[in-house]
Amino acid sequence: MFDIFNSYLDKQLFSLDTKKIKNKILNLKSKDKGRIVSNYGGWQSKSIEKIDKNFESLFNKISLSVKKIEKHLLLSKELKLINLWYNVNGLGSFNRPHSHPGCVISGVYYVSIPKNSGSIVFLNKDLDTFYQDNIKNYNEYNSSTWTIEPKENQCILFPSYLIHYVEPNLNKEERISISFNYGF
């Protein structure tokens, strides 16, 4: 399954002003109690369907990466941004295992990533365990999990059906990200 994951996977480092993005998200957080979906602790904004003008350049870059993946999928329709939401996770906060049903490509853009604030982990539920003892070195093709330690200003795209979770933030500083879905 992770061979398919790698054909979808796109990790890009952008050079955007994360301080401006962070301040916008924290300002919204101060005015909105948010929602609970897969998050345990922390804050998640309500689903947003329209891109804030302050984030247009970010989503223009993300859309270019989505287009690259879209070419390989040979879809009959163009993918479009379905929704996005903001995440602010303090000490001990994490996201439970989940997927994004009804979408094709999901992703996360990392605004602020303090050290030890939690990696994103993808689960390979289809992996057969009978040959596990014969693996010399684990990689994205033969592992039951695949972990990516995010970097600030990084965007990670992945197949929406892939179950994933975010490890707990072990830092007193908040981990801030923007999650989103593309579909029809």
Image (tube, rainbow, N blue to C red):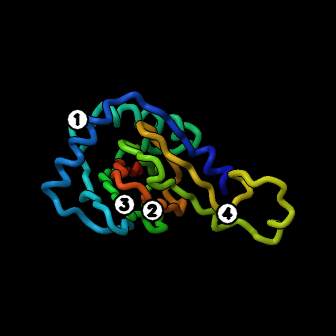
Label 1–label 4 contact, CB within 8 A: no
Quote the CA–CA distance across marks 1 and 2: 29 Å
10 Å crowding of disc 1: few (<14), some (14-19), many (20+):
few
Q: Secondary structure at mark 1?
A: helix
Quote the CA–CA distance across marks 4 and 2: 20 Å
Q: Secondary structure at mark 4?
A: loop
Quote the CA–CA distance across marks 1 and 3: 27 Å
10 Å crowding of disc 3: few (<14), some (14-19), many (20+):
some
Residue type pointed to by label 3: Leu
Write down the residue under mark 1: 54
10 Å crowding of disc 2: few (<14), some (14-19), many (20+):
many
N-terminal of the two: label 1 or label 4?
A: 1
Write down the residue under mark 3: 91
* Residue at 35 percent of width and 32 percent of height: 60
Write down the residue under mark 4: 144
Q: Is residue 152 above or below residue 44?
A: above
* Residue at 47 percent of width and 41 percent of height: 151
